[in-house]
Image: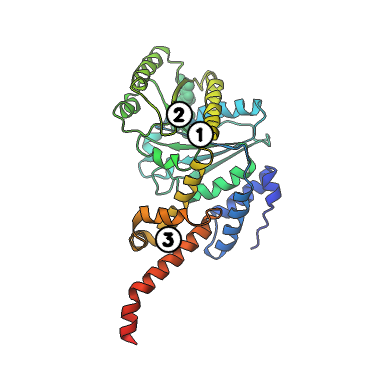
Amino acid sequence: MKHHISISDVLLGNKMAVARALNFLENRRPEEIGRVSELIEQLSRNPRPGRHIIGITGPPGVGKSSLISRMIGEYRNQNQTIGVISVDPSSRKSGGALLGDRARINWDPTDPGVFIRSMAAGRHLGGLAWRTRHLMTVFEAAYDVILLETVGVGQSETEIDEVVDTVVFVVQPGSGDSLQFMKAGIMEIPHILVINKADQKALAQKALNDLEAVKSLGWMDKSGWQPGIVMTSALEGWGQEELLTRLKAHQDHLISSDDNQRRRHNRISWILLLYRERFGSFGMETLGGEENILRLIEQVDIGNPFYGLCRLTEKLRDTLRSSNSGIIHERT
Ligand SMILES: Nc1nc2c(ncn2[C@@H]2O[C@H](COP(=O)(O)OP(=O)(O)O)[C@@H](O)[C@H]2O)c(=O)[nH]1
Ligand SMILES: [Mg+2]
């Protein structure tokens, strides 16, 4: 079956074209790898220049989906278009029990400026395999704001950190766990911390005090960004405006400090993922381990991750050939 995917329709944010491109990338069959590569390259060459990719993570039940519904409303007021990828943890073995009652992301399905896609988490902790990155290229070409919802409890944040521009970690008042993570410094520092369900006034104030105390110990990420704390109530519908202001501030910060370093780094880790997925630990060892491979990727064209993968594959073949040449020689 031949799919026709119109890049220009994707760029216009045409929902049908977006859905078609996503389906093609998700259901790809091995023989279509060439067309997948081509599509990803075309999309990667045409991202929305001002796009902002935001990861919304945090324990189950803190109100991430509810908050995203509010954020969608707020971004629509600002006339921005939005694509949401919601990584559904329900397919994970332990996921079901953790979920409790769960809100769906609420939006107007007739609004052409909003597109929501759920995907199963799969075997990765946050489900952020290369599959997410493939889908992301479609969203980056089609929407101004991209929201990625994942479940995270402390240590899986690095995974999301490698996919998005800005990490938002959501907690709820009275749940000591995530606050403990932060105090103990276990958690990667998110760019923005949200205390949702702040309609629970007294508990929320206590959580804020706790976090402020941790903050005074000198929170700052590598690029000099000072993480902020925002209180929201997705139930009552307040705080999302301030959250968007903070998000914009982080985007401005990235533009002025990092420039494209962060996105470049993320693409490099994508190529590493593809390579690891294909050749496993054997491939990793043969090319001298992760650090060495990252150095190799630094030298190749990362515009299309599949080219990067091809270069690594060639390098692997050369390495194997030269290390086997002695044996082959003896046998002939
Ligand atoms: N009191 C209160 N409840 C909320 C708030 N936001 C979400 N909830 C409730 O918390 C539960 C979990 O919300 P959900 O958005 O599914 O959380 P997620 O698992 O983090 O995506 C639902 O019953 C929501 O109605 C809030 O701001 N205040
Ligand atoms: Mg949710």
313 w.r.t. 155: above or below? below
Distance Cα–Cα, label 3 vs label 1: 35 Å
The residue singled out by tag 3 in the image is 278
Q: In the rendered structure, which disc, 2 or 1, sits on the residue that comes first in sequence? A: 2
Q: In the rendered structure, which disc, 3 or 1, sits on the residue that comes first in sequence? A: 1
The crowd level at tag 2 (other Cα within 10 Å; few <14, some 14-19, many 20+) is some
Residue 194 shows in this picture: no
- Circle on res. 328: none
Extreme-bottom residue of the structure: 332
The residue singled out by tag 2 in the image is 225
Q: Position of residue 165 (x, y in %)?
A: 51, 37
Distance Cα–Cα, label 2 vs label 3: 36 Å
The residue singled out by tag 1 in the image is 257
- Amino acid found under the numbered disc labelled 3: Arg
Distance Cα–Cα, label 2 vs label 1: 9 Å
Q: In the rendered structure, which disc, 2 or 3, sits on the residue that comes first in sequence? A: 2
Q: SS class of the residue under badge 2?
A: loop
Contact check, label 2 and label 1, Cβ < 8 Å: yes
Q: Position of residue 106 (x, y in %)?
A: 57, 30
Extreme-left residue of the structure: 184
Quadrant housing the C terminus: bottom left
* Callout in the foreground (2, 3): 2
- Amino acid found under the numbered disc labelled 1: Ser
